[in-house]
Amino acid sequence: FEIARLYALQGRFREAHDVLEFQLMPLAMDEAKMHTLHAYLHRKLKDHPDALPMQRTNWKTLAARWLQTAFRCDPLEYWGACEAAFHDGGDGAAALARAEQNRGLKAQQLMEAVCDYWGIGAWDEVIALCDAALAKAAVEKPYAKEGALPLRDTLAACNSYKNPMFVYF
């Protein structure tokens, strides 16, 4: 899986796809992140010069198939929810809205998806998701009080987009 991620980070989408398709797929059919990466690669291959003709014309169907497989492995796959929105032509706000529909601590899980995209060099997606999080943070109510945080405020902090990491990314 890491070899495929490294190829994606280098923009070598065809090689990343081939590693997933021919080497890992038979061994790890129940890995949601691998299927999400596979869907991302099909979305990127649609315009890539090294893509096979079938990958250029059928990318949407192929990517949708891998996203469905990812959700069968893990129905709460946050990265998959974000990728599904990008797959459908949405922006960062659409990805965030789709991912929030049935997820828990939203900021914590969004940070995980941002790191997943960061790890494969998907800078446009990282920026789109962080911008959407920062836009939501601007209208959030403050959650913390002075002094020690009670448990309810600690949970609110994990659920808040007022996280300095979104600015950092």
Image (tube, rainbow, N blue to C red):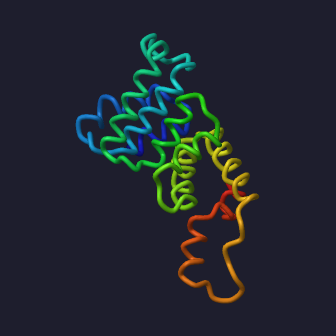
Q: Is residue 102 above or below residue 7?
A: below
Is residue 31 placed above or below 88 in the rendered structure?
below
- Specify whether 149 is left or right of 26: right
What residue is shown at x 37% (from left), y 28% (from top)?
A: 65
Residue 152 lies, in percent from the top left, at 55, 78
Which one is in front, 155 or 121? Answer: 155
Outermost residue to the right: 138
Q: Foreground residue, 164 or 88?
A: 88
Locate residue 93: give its quadrant. top right
Q: Quadrant of the C terminus?
A: bottom right
Drawn side of residue 56 relative to residue 128, left or right:
left
Q: Is residue 122 left or right of residue 24?
A: right
Q: Residue at x 23, y 35 (%)?
A: 26
Looking at the picture, how far across and down is residue 80, in whole percent? Answer: 45, 42
Residue 121 in the image: state x and y as whole percent: 58, 41
Quadrant in which residue 19 is drawn: top left
Q: Is residue 60 above or below residue 4?
A: above
Seen from the viewer's position, the closer of residues 97 and 122 is: 97
Q: Quadrant for the N terminus, please.
A: top left
